Image: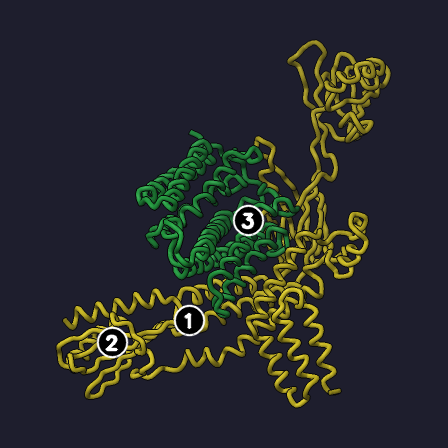
């Protein structure tokens, strides 16, 4: 079976998982939350299998490369990193509410990959510039970073929602969401992971650029936007660790930061530059 | 008032730069501004404030945000283009603004360098200002009988045991030694104190990160001052001894020669390129010294200069592939590889032919074509053109072909000639760089990642344990502080309490 067909089915599994988490928030039923967890876990297993299958198939086709080489494959991997990171966080915090805010991102990434007419799901051979050992480490670190920032985005929205309900008047919808302090702390952990991974991603990318193009930094739009994202999150970390900012201001900065992440990922394709093969 | 004049314009300048982005900065600066005019005796105070401002985190955040915004501009305005190309497309005033601020090469402009320099200065000053405090946290060992950590201690951090002080103290000491290395003990008649700590060095994590940023900037500067970026194109079989600098297009002598022996490009079945390969020979005084193969992602290093496979192209046509078929018989066809101007024999030796002319695009619309001159042993000489896309041409312009024998590939009976394709002589395009700063940049990157781990994932943790004789029995209390990660500290303290409870029970 084609990995891309499996992946388009997984899109629906993630949608089920998202709806279950959301209904759990609205109705307060624990069972729905468990459905959410189990469906996203099942989705993740199938998702991993599909990625491995695609990897094997690329060898069968005589191209033999990791499935990280075009927009389709990167979206599939982005969705995968979001789900796995989310499940780790869910397991550690024993709280399922974040699922309602993060699973839609995993679902959308996979749906965009599977159903957009502009994106080809064919396994394509690697052009010479992509034939490098740095491909795998660069893509993994970047997308783990992006996924951590996606979780931080979800947590920031939860924080801002929770603030609307400081008197705890409203019903169940807000009750299940953890206390603002917990959200803030978790958000910081995600920003730290994301920042570390983004740094590693930029470093591996520039080592690669140095061997492929002869220059470790050439102010190509993708490079520049990743630096912009890095600077924004550096500002977040400084304002939190040294100026003591918490809560609302940090959440808003994290929303802006995630906007930069998305622009680095998608928006840059509309600007000319060396990463344009990622289209 | 006059002696301060040299300072005021300087402050003014900073204000202009930061004003739109950070309101509170303007506020601080204008406060100093007033102070300068109000009293000269406070000039020391002013220097002090400027110093503090240069080392402030407010400035750091402002600079990071400014750098981000400016970088956004750089991705929106086309960089390193000829400004004249852009002139007609936007409003003249906007063009003038962009042009005069050097924004067509923004990342190399003076004011961009000024922002980077400010960030470096900010890092250095901030490190100097904060160093004494950090050093104090690092070096001072607090007294084990300190009172403060035990103020407002949660009740679950203390418990009562019914034993004598000496036994309890020695059992506690043995237990704590398994938990931390440098245990300090202080004992009196009624009380016993323990102190231990972990992760002192984490205080310097931030310094490591900041140092790494400076190291990377230094590496970049070294590259900019002592390195170069250039390119060169070498046709197959040719030798060059100089390259062209990208900045200014000036030639630069290498001090040795490079010859391109061969260039090969291979393709996948779907037509995407698979490999670009240049076989290079490096020569010294016209003698071969070293042969090297250059591929994309595998640069070649020779005498400290690095060569990268950057581009390729067709320099000239090496061979022409012709198919000669006998009219009527489908199977009999000869493929001949001819060179321009070199006579070749006809399949059955009835004469000679020669390619006398090549056109990439005949009449600018009919595609590649070659002119063939046939000299048979008997009979007159014949010249006519052979097309690559003969079939589509004959469908599009049937009359043209019929009426003109000079365009008909079967003008020499009994043969039909067709043009199969060309073998090219390629040239290889090389990026040629020298950058003595690269290894320093990598060292900076490594330092930064190490610094992040120390900063984010280690903490300076201090733990105090106190055993004192109370009316109800022996009271054991555990308290602690941590530079970060309060959750980890809490877990640490709980572990110690649970361990002590089981040992002392």
Q: Are marks 1 and 3 in contact (CB under 8 Å)?
A: no
Task: Give how far apart the Cα atoms at labels 1 and 2 are.
Answer: 26 Å
Report x, y in % for residue B445: 52, 62
Q: How would you rate the neighbour count of disc 1 (Cα within 10 Å): few for under 14, some for 14-19, many for 20 or more?
A: many
Residue B382 left/right relative to B218? right
Front residue (pair B161, A135): B161
Please name the residue that numbered disc 2 is placed on.
Answer: B477
The colour style of the image is by chain
Q: Say which of marks 3 and 2 sits in front.
A: 2
Secondary structure of residue under mark 1: helix
Q: Using the image, name the chain to which the residue with label 1 belongs.
A: B
- Color of chain A here? green
Residue A262, numbered label: 3
| Quarter where residue B469 is shown | bottom left
Residue at left 48%, top 81%?
Answer: B132
Q: Say which of marks 1 and 3 sits in front.
A: 3
Please name the residue that numbered disc 1 is placed on.
Answer: B202
In the rendered image, the quadrant that contains the N terminus of chain A is: top left
Does any portion of residue B242 appear in the rendered image?
A: no
Residue B369 left/right relative to B489? right
- Color of chain B here? yellow
Report x, y in % for residue B286: 70, 53
Task: Give how far apart the Cα atoms at labels 1 and 3 are.
Answer: 33 Å
Residue at left 80%, top 25%?
Answer: B371
In the rendered image, the quadrant that contains the C terminus of chain A is: top right
Residue that sits furthest to the bottom in the current view: B41
Compared with B7, B410 (above or below) is: above
């Amino acid at each position: 079976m084609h990995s891309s067909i499996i992946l388009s089915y997984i899109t629906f599994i993630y949608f089920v998982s998202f709806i279950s988490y959301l209904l759990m928030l609205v109705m307060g039923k624990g069972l729905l939350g468990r459905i959410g967890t189990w469906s996203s876990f099942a989705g993740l297993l199938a998702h991993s299998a599909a990625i491995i299958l695609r990897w094997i198939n690329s060898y069968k086709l005589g191209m033999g490369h990791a499935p990280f080489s075009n927009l389709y494959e990167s979206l599939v991997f982005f969705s995968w990193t979001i789900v796995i990171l989310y499940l780790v966080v869910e397991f550690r915090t024993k709280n399922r509410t974040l699922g309602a805010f993060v699973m839609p991102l995993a679902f959308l990434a996979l749906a965009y990959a599977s159903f957009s007419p502009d994106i080809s799901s064919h396994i394509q051979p690697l052009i010479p510039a992509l034939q490098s050992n740095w491909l795998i480490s660069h893509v993994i670190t970047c997308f783990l970073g992006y996924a951590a920032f996606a979780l931080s985005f979800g947590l920031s929205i939860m924080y801002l929602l929770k603030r609307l309900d400081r008197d705890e008047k409203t019903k169940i919808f807000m009750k299940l969401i953890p206390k603002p302090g917990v959200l803030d702390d978790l958000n910081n952990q995600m920003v730290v992971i994301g920042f570390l991974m983004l740094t590693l991603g930029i470093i591996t990318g520039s080592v690669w650029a140095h061997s492929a193009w002869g220059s470790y930094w050439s102010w190509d739009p993708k490079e520049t936007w990743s630096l912009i994202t890095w600077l924004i999150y550096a500002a977040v970390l400084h304002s939190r660790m040294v100026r003591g900012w918490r809560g609302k201001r940090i959440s808003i900065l994290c929303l802006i930061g995630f906007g930069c992440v998305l622009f680095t990922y998608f928006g840059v394709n509309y600007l000319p530059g060396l990463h344009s093969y990622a289209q | 008032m006059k002696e301060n004049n040299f300072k005021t314009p300087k402050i003014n300048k900073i204000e202009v730069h930061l004003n739109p982005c950070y309101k509170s900065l303007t506020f601080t600066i204008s406060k100093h501004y007033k102070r300068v005019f109000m009293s000269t005796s406070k000039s020391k105070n002013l220097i002090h404030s400027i110093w503090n401002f240069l080392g402030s985190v407010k400035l750091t955040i402002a600079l990071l945000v400014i750098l981000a915004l400016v970088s956004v501009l750089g991705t929106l305005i086309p960089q390193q283009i000829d400004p004249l190309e852009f002139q007609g497309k936007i409003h003249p005033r906007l063009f003038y603004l962009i042009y005069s601020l050097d924004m067509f090469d923004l990342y190399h402009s003076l004011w961009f360098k000024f922002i980077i320099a400010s960030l470096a200065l900010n890092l250095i000053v901030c490190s100097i200002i904060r160093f004494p405090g950090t050093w104090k946290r690092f070096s001072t060992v607090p007294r084990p009988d300190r009172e403060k950590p035990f103020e407002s201690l949660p009740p679950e951090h203390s418990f009562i045991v019914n034993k004598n002080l000496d036994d309890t103290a020695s059992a506690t000491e043995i237990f704590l030694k398994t938990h931390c290395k440098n245990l300090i003990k202080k004992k009196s008649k009624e009380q016993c104190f323990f102190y231990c700590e972990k992760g002192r060095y984490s205080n310097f994590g931030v310094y490591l990160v900041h140092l790494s940023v400076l190291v990377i900037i230094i590496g970049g500067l070294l590259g900019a001052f002592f390195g170069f970026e250039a390119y060169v194109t070498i046709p197959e079989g040719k030798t060059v001894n100089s390259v062209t600098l990208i900045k200014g297009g000036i030639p630069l002598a290498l001090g040795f020669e490079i010859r391109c022996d061969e260039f090969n490009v291979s393709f996948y079945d779907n037509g995407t390129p698979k490999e670009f390969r240049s076989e290079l020979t490096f020569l010294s005084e016209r003698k071969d010294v070293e042969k090297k193969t250059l591929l994309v992602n595998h640069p070649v290093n020779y005498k400290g200069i690095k060569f990268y496979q950057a581009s390729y192209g067709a320099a000239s046509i090496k061979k022409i592939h012709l198919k000669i078929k006998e009219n009527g018989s489908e199977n009999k066809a000869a493929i001949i590889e001819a060179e321009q101007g070199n006579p070749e024999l006809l399949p059955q030796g009835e004469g000679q032919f020669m390619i006398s002319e090549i056109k990439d695009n005949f009449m600018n619309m009919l595609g590649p074509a070659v002119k063939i001159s046939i000299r048979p042993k008997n009979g007159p000489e014949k010249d006519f053109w052979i097309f690559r896309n003969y079939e589509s041409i004959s469908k599009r312009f049937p009359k043209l072909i019929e009426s003109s024998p000079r365009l008909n590939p079967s003008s020499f009976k009994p043969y039909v000639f067709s043009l199969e394709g060309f073998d090219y002589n390629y040239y290889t395009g090389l990026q040629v760089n020298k950058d003595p700063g690269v290894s320093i940049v990598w060292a900076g990157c490594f330092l930064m990642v190490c610094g992040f781990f120390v900063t984010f994932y280690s903490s300076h943790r201090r733990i105090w344990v106190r055993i004192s004789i109370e009316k109800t029995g022996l009271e054991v209390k555990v308290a602690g502080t941590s530079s970060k990660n309060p959750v980890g500290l809490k877990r640490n303290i709980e572990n110690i309490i649970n361990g002590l409870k089981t040992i002392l029970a």
